Image (tube, rainbow, N blue to C red):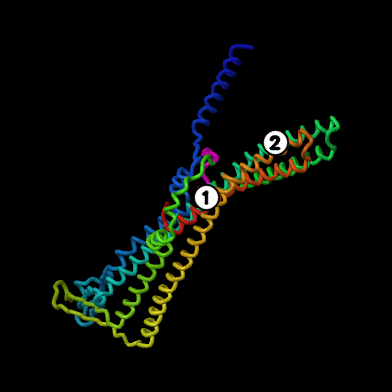
Amino acid sequence: MSPLPLLLATALTVASGLSSVASAAEETLIGGNVDSLLEFARSHHPEFAALRLEAEAAAERVAPAGALPDPMFRTELRDVTNEASGGSANLLPARIGSTKYTLTQTLPWFGKRDLRRDVAAAGADEASGRTREGWLELATRIKQTYAQHHVHLHTLRLMGENLDLLQRLGEIARTRYANGLAPQQDAIRAQGEYTMLQSDLAMFEGESAQASARMRSLLGRPPAHIKLRPPDILRPLPPAATLDFVALEARLRANNPQLAQDAARIAAADKGRELTYRNRYPDVTLGVSPIQTRSRVSEWELMVEVNIPLQQGSRRAQERESERLFEAAARRHESTLNQALADLGEALAGLEASRRVESLIATSLLPQAELTLQSALAGYETGKVDFAAVLDAQRQIRRAQQDLVKARGDQRLRLAEIERLIGEEL
């Protein structure tokens, strides 16, 4: 090879290597634990960003709501044809009969501005509650998806171990059949059980892939260079003493974002009701008008304008509407509280049940299943136990292992629901 092609080939190889190194360096790994996923979602999820911006926009409405209306300025050109002076038509103030300048300012009745500001502030509080609710909903889904994905991956690992065990059982059955110590049916049953477990494995692999795709969606569809680590560890459970219903009920009443929104609606309805009753009183408009004649101000006028609240039927209907809205907001708050307390009790009961299941499986059922399998294997190899007993023992230990993993995952699902209800982490 000539020196030039060799040099070009070397340069391309070096450039390709540098490109792959740079690409690997640009990759970012997130995940492995729930906290890193929550931190990423808080910064990158578009729906949560939209809720934050809407809350900021609602907060900006408070100051304008209590401000005075803009003043009005009006100009009136009088005798623009100059008929009184015998001149020609003109539009210049100094060359017509007179010009009237009017500046007016509307003043709402006492207390109306403060009430409008309070209504807007309650709306801002409601928007802030929606933001908190949106974040808690998103965080709960991330926590639950993480726990489900962890269950899938752990179950897949257990299935792999069970596949190895079934393969060993099949070899034992085939060896005993070859030596005339067992019927051929044993080897066939072992192969059938192996195939069924492979089918379950494929199903869990699909669910794991779905959980991974769902997690990327919950994180706001991160770019391709951001990779997700598999869920390594589950979140630690809080001490059982902290899961007291009475204590959690107090935290729910204080921090639940849906209750906060309802409280803001009640405040807005209450202030809106007061404002409606204040509309019985008129607003006042004050004005001042200098009148220019030719090149000098010859007169001054003062003006007071009052709107007359004559439409009493309309106002009474508005007052009744405001009363019903206030009552509806109070009832909605009561309904939300009842449902939240019911959900809290259900989640606590489910968490406690999963804890008992985990304890029973880990301390009793799983050790017994392992001993049963060992005894069945030893008995089958010596011809004292038939192959059906071995398969039953293998199914029992597999079911116990999967139930143990499921119970631990279910506890995290319940914990995430409890944290959503009380509005904070335990």
Q: Secondary structure at mark 1?
A: helix
Label 2, label 1: how many angstroms apart (C-alpha)?
37 Å
Residue 214 in sight from this viewpoint: no
Query: As rendered, which of 57 and 104 lies closer to the eye?
Result: 57
Horizontal side of 238 relative to 379 (left or right) equals left
Q: In the rendering, at what x and y percent does residue 111 appear?
A: 25, 74
Residue 244 picture quarter: bottom left
Q: In the rendering, at what x and y percent does residue 100 appear?
A: 21, 76
Horizontal side of 265 relative to 187 (left or right) equals left
Residue at position x 57%, y 22% in the image: 12
Q: In this picture, which residue range is highlighted in magenta? A: 219-230
Above or below, 47 against 384 in this view is: below
Residue at position x 48%, y 54% in the image: 47
Amino acid at circle 2: Leu
Query: As rendered, which of 289 and 372 lies closer to the eye?
Result: 372
Horizontal side of 156 relative to 228 (left or right) equals right
Return the residue at label 2: 165
